[in-house]
Amino acid sequence: MKKKLTIITIFTVTMLFGLSLKASTEVWDLQALYGITQDGIANAISDAKSHFSSNPNDTIIIEIAAGTYDISGSGSHGIDLTSGLKPGPNGRLIFQGAGMEETTLVFETRQRMMSGFNVYQLEFRDMHMTCSTMTVTQGTVVSVSAGEIVLDIEEGFPTPLELFNDWGQGRYLRRYTKSQTDPQLIQDNNDQEVWGWRNGAAFHPELVSGNQWRIFLNSTTRVLNNYSVGDYVGIKSKHEGEIYWFATGNDLVFRNIKWTQSSRGLVRNGFSNVGLYGCRIERAAPINGQTPCLSTPSGGPQMNQPLSTGNSVSTNMVLEDCFIDSPGDDNIAFFNVTGGVVKNCIIRNGFARGILATVDASDICVTNTVMENAYLFDESVTPDGTYFTVSEATSELGKGAFNQFCAANVINATNVMVSPSSVTLDSLGQSFQLAADVSPTDATYKVVLWSSSDPSVVDVDENGIVTANGEGTTTVTVVTIDGNFTSSATVTVMIPIPPIITSAQNRTRTSAINIFPNPTTSLLNINIQETREKLSAVVVDLSGRELIRKELETERNIFNLDSLPVGVYLLRIKRGNLIIENKRILKTQ
């Protein structure tokens, strides 16, 4: 039993027939009263239920201090509400952390983080929930043959055998871009490839040598012709527990919760009024500098996912201001739901579908939401498997689940313009704000996505701020989520170098050398006012390796740079071995 209750506020609820009932908001310090463990949480829940039996309309806030806590314990549920929770009509149980970067609860990988039946008025706020082990892996293609693929698993990541589940589904491969910081799911010619199950039984991967593993496809004759040596592959095997699993109830809220390593949340049996606000599903921290392809092996929130035939309808299922990146299935799914909202969210890298609406879903509104490398899928409109962008779904008004009831007066975007159209940065780390003006000014969906064609030159954040990373020229592009209108700016990074001056005589003579145009796509003019002394021009790369040499024998000389790839080079004007002019030049397309 708890040692102390702190009563924060007391107010009176006026009831029918003039009766009144005192209700209070109480804060319980979980660490001080119970300890932040699986048993401590169980004891706090037990005491809260006892408290509600006599004070049904109280609000109980169970505070979880900053820190990292092991909630694994015993059993299949970390936070166990399977015996139910039902305060009075105005009562509420809240688990309150210190912030998603301050309070972390660590659960055993294969256990459900929380589970319950007949649960009402429950809320979780401001914490990070994760698993005790890494739940996904990835590697590079070594070889492909009938019925199998050999992958060199990334150093530090789990082996496929460590993640293997012994049941008949949930194991797939897909190709990703080879990026250390943000691997992206490849959409074209890249279906999910099923592995690890043959003849009704598990078929385990086998170690070849070192970090190389042979993964067996379900079909002995299947050849992955779209996979090449050196391709990068994300590997999933569903084996982790759900982040939540609730059947029957009402009013479940998650605010500012971050989940890593596990992401699949289920409500069933008509559980209604479920809200996720400011929540995040993120990829785990990089391992040896390499960001994981997948955040988890499973999908994201599954709204009223069927338990059996005749599953009751859920209503008012909301995701707002959420970020869901790279889960191993549908980012969000609406099953038997009437009235769902996805608002102000960012949905990235849908391994299956970005947002799924099944044939049983209706009145699903997607508004002001970024779908990056992910798509909408409406089973009632596209049983053949056609995917929608957000704007395409808007045009399907009245035809299916995505009828956009909350966007009946949509004003579509017609154009976007980036300003300025060109920028030059002259130091590494320098930043500049690009602006994207969406037309018309009163467009309903004005959210845009930014991208850089070469992040090694500049990268760009979600607000259009470009930052110089290396010399060169790149294109920064913005695209509207409504209509996919695009506009681009050219960004050049050219860092000045001090001129080489050896004497007053050289200062006079080098000032008479004119080099243009710079940047250039092909030809470079070198004009010299006086040529009494023999001069030469040498183009070198940034490591000093000589690429082109030309004797300057006339006042006007032309360099042909067609043989050089796009990039930054140094042009050196030399008198013998003495460099009298040293200038950066930029070769562009």
Image (tube, rainbow, N blue to C red):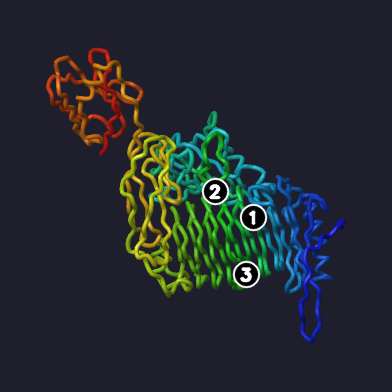
Quadrant occupied by the C terminus: top left
Q: Amino acid at mark 2?
A: Arg
* Residue at mark 1: 243
Q: CA distance from mark 2 to mark 3?
A: 32 Å
Label total for image:
3
Q: Amino acid at mark 1?
A: Ile
**10 Å crowding of disc 3: few (<14), some (14-19), many (20+):** some
Question: Residue drawn at (48%, 65%), measured in percent from left and top?
Answer: 366
Question: Residue drawn at (47%, 70%), measured in percent from left and top?
Answer: 401
Residue at the limit of the structure toward the front, as seen here: 504
Disc number lying in front (2 or 3): 3
Quadrant occupied by the N terminus: bottom right
Q: Disc 2 vs disc 3: Cβ atoms closer than 8 Å?
A: no
Q: Position of residue 190 (x, y in %)?
A: 42, 49
Question: Residue drawn at (78%, 75%), measured in percent from left and top?
Answer: 12
Is 472 placed above or below 573 here?
below
Q: Position of residue 479 (x, y in %)?
A: 37, 55
Q: Which of the 4 quarters of the picture holds residue 119?
A: bottom right
Question: Residue drawn at (43%, 66%), measured in percent from left and top?
Answer: 383
| Disc number for residue 273 | 3
SS class of the residue under badge 3? strand
Is 271 in front, or is 30? 30
* Residue at mark 2: 171
Q: Amino acid at mark 3?
A: Asn
Q: From the viewer's perspective, is 271 left or right of 531?
A: right
Disc number lying in front (3 or 1): 3
Q: From the viewer's perspective, is 14 left or right of 217?
A: right
Q: Position of residue 574 (x, y in %)?
A: 24, 17
| Disc number for residue 362 | none
SS class of the residue under badge 2? strand
SS class of the residue under badge 1? loop
Is residue 380 something that shows in the picture?
yes
